[in-house]
Amino acid sequence: MSHVITTEGLTKAYGSRTVVDSLDLRVPEGRVYGFLGPNGSGKSTTMKMLLSLVRPTRGEIRVLGRPMDRRTRHELTPLIGSLIESPPGYGHLTGRENMAIVRRMLGLSERRVERAVATVRLRDQMDKPVRAYSLGMKQRLGIAMALAREPRLLILDEPTNGLDPAGIEEIRDLLVSLAGEGVTVMVSSHLLDEIDRMASVLGILAQGRLIFQGTREELFDRSAPDLIVETPEPERALASGLSAVRVREGLRLAGRDGGSTAALVRHLVRHDVPVHGLRRVERSLEEVFMDLTGREGLS
Ligand code: ADP
């Protein structure tokens, strides 16, 4: 698999405080990469470093196969669309006037701009002043600005922040369809729910460190499911020294992988506990995430 973004040991410190710590990112081509982490975990700082808007303290960045630094950024940025301080645009100007500014600044054709506006489905709203737009429309206009240069890579910082479920759905459909056309999309969020169904690869930050990177399935594999032991004699099992909580069917034991499940079965047999059934309880992605981030949750 080829990677559109790779970093080695990417680090940013402000004074003595390290806010992004030794990241080895791997963003695969043509996928939606969900960059997830609580507020303040370092997502924006990382994205700004990827765009060479913030200078790394240490580490290497390669974007689209080339080192990204102050010398190369002028060649690389035309290939990247980004939405960092969102939403952009002048409120007193119409959508059309805003897009015209972007078009002139970047030297783009009318056709490209029209295509970007059509992609985000804002064609009917272009003559309204941007201040009359809903937040979702403003975000879509920002994405149209990023798309107008027909980038190979899109870097979007919290594009779903503050949107209602319908607005989130629209952004999700848009990003998934762009990835389907071969555009690599890196999108950040502090809310797992907002990103879960659009991203096929996840990178999870906690306090500046990358605590997980991989597919959704790999994230699930990381978690050991709880186990329900169905027994009419839970007291006997508890008396044998098992650490478990009582539930309707018998007992529930936390986080058991294959090996510890086998050990549990041997223990139950040894202590003559009648077992009527054993059942795994899969966790939700949210629970897996909470386990990884030390049950801090995402807020
Ligand atoms: P996120 O995008 O995940 O919310 P940020 O990257 O914005 O996180 O911030 C990570 C940490 O870095 C925060 O604690 C923030 O206060 C700090 N930080 C960000 N920019 C600066 C700066 N220019 N100077 C000092 N600290 C900063």
Image: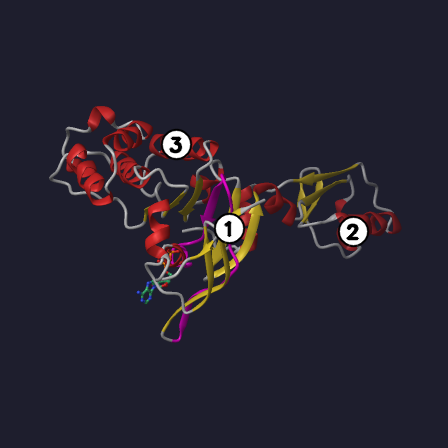
**Residue 56, horizontal then vertical, whole percent:** 40, 65
* Magenta-colored span: 16-43
Left or right: 234 in relation to 134: right
Number of the label disc, if any, that sits on residue 174: 3
Left or right: 245 in relation to 175: right
Mark yes or no: residue 81 visible: no
The answer to whether marks 2 and 1 mark residues whose Cβ atoms lie closer than 8 Å is: no
Residue that numbered label 2 is attached to: 259
Query: How is the rendered protein coloured?
Result: secondary structure
Of the numbered discs 2 and 3, the one sitting upstream in the chain is 3
Q: Residue furthest bottom?
A: 16
Residue that numbered label 1 is attached to: 203
Query: Is residue 42 rendered magenta in the image?
Result: yes
Amino acid type at mark 3: Leu
Q: Residues within 10 Å of mark 2 (few under 14, many from 20)?
A: few
**Residue 175, horizontal then vertical, whole percent:** 41, 35
Residue at the (12%, 38%) spot, across then down: 93
The Cα atoms of the two marked residues, 3 and 1, are separated by 20 Å
Of the numbered discs 3 and 1, the one sitting upstream in the chain is 3
Q: How many marks?
A: 3
The Cα atoms of the two marked residues, 2 and 3, are separated by 43 Å
The Cα atoms of the two marked residues, 2 and 1, are separated by 28 Å
| Quarter of image, ligand 1 | bottom left
Amino acid type at mark 2: Gly
Q: Residues within 10 Å of mark 3 (few under 14, many from 20)?
A: some
Residue at the (62%, 45%) spot, across then down: 218
